[in-house]
Amino acid sequence: MSTTHDDTPIAARVRHVEALLEQRGVVAPGAIDRRIDENAAGGSLAQGARIVARAWVDPGFRDRLLHDGNAAIGELGLSMAGGIQDQRLEVLANEDSDHHVVVCTLCSCYPVALLGPSPSWYKSEAYRSRVVRDPRGVLAEFGLTLPDATRITVWDASAETRYMVLPQRPTGTDDLDEPALAALVTRKGLIGTAAV
């Protein structure tokens, strides 16, 4: 990671500037993340959404995706890209009894080629440290309250392994085709901090 003269990571400085801009009212809270979402909607985020929609309509693809994410996304002409060929993609399926959420506690490892740019909160020290200690509380802050019986597993991404959540298919969507289903998928859903 690039550093400045005082060894402070540039990414941390950028997050600090974003926070100051929000605190001083220069930009609305969350505006930068919303803009990133808008930019990514036509690009990388669309790839992750496409993968999820295919898994929702094709049980065979879903099984292959959960078994070997890299091979399965290859069927759609996708890859982890970025010149890092040995990066492994693990896909985690959310169910009624199990909910998965992704974090990178050391930095901000994230499957950018499939999900678009990571949101600023994903990179924040607060998220990275708190979601590991209190995942249920952090998810509630995102507006996602899960039943007490639902087990929450936090997955820590690394340079070798990146994670993507396969959200549960929303009820009442049996009549939707893949493009319509893909339009329902959000970045937060792919990280596990929201339901679809």
Image: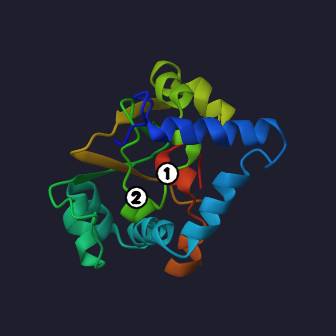
Q: Are marks 2 and 1 in contact (CB under 8 Å)?
A: yes
Q: Horizontal and vertical percent for residue 100?
A: 43, 39
Taking the spot 56% from the left edge, 50% from the top edge, the residue there is 188
Q: Is residue 167 above or below residue 37?
A: above
Residue placed furthest toward the front: 5
Disc 2 element: helix
Q: Nearer the viewer, residue 1 or 192?
A: 1
* Res 52 → quadrant: bottom left
Along the horizontal axis of the image, is 3 left or right of 180?
Answer: left
Q: Horizontal and vertical percent for residue 140?
A: 65, 31
Query: Upstream in the sequence, badge 2 or badge 1?
Result: 2
Residue wearing tag 2: 112
Q: Horizontal and vertical percent for residue 54?
A: 40, 72
Q: Which mark is residue 35?
A: none
Q: Nearer the viewer, residue 22 or 147?
A: 22
Along the horizontal axis of the image, is 89 left or right of 53?
Answer: left
Along the horizontal axis of the image, is 58 left or right of 136?
Answer: left
Residue wearing tag 1: 118
Disc 1 element: loop
Residue placed furthest toward the left: 86
